[in-house]
Amino acid sequence: MTPEKAETTALKALGWLVADEELLPVFMGASGVDQDALRESAGDAAFLGSVLDFLLMDDAWVIRACDALSLPYEHLAIARQVLPGGAQIHWT
């Protein structure tokens, strides 16, 4: 997956999240962003990575988002690995 495709995937996930009236306030509370910061940060790859980090915390959220966006379930995790801060850490 290219960085551009990862950002597009994350933007779609953000659009889905913004439309979810139950989950959006949870994300905003967990991340500390308000409506203005949400709009301003939508073009920032690192912020988009945090959106995916949030969604990846719960399999049910991944399933709901991917079903709504017609994406394979592993697609969000793959996109997250490509965005800034998403590289897997090797402790050895």
Image (tube, helix red, strand yellow):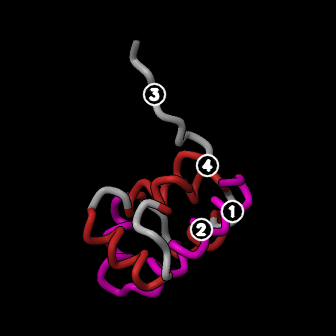
Instruction: Classify mark 1: residues with Cα within 10 Å, few (<14), some (14-19) or many (20+).
Output: few
Q: Decide: marks 1, 4 in contact (CB < 8 A)?
A: no
Q: Which residue lies furthest to the top in this view?
A: 92
Which residue is identified by label 1?
A: 5
Q: Quadrant for residue 65, please give it.
A: bottom left
Q: Decide: marks 2, 1 in contact (CB < 8 A)?
A: yes
Which residue is identified by label 2?
A: 9
Looking at the magenta stretch, what is its main secondary structure? helix
Q: Which amino acid does label 4 sit on?
A: Leu
The residue located at (43%, 60%) in the rendering is 74
Q: Residue furthest front?
A: 72
Per the model, the C-alpha gap separating discs 3 and 4 is 14 Å
Q: Tag 3 or tag 1, which sits nearer the N-term?
A: 1
**Residue 48: percent from the left, percent from the top?**
57, 59
Instruction: Classify mark 4: residues with Cα within 10 Å, few (<14), some (14-19) or many (20+).
Output: many
Which residue is identified by label 4?
A: 83
The residue located at (53%, 73%) in the rendering is 14
Q: Quadrant for residue 67, please give it.
A: bottom left
> Quadrant location of the C terminus?
top left
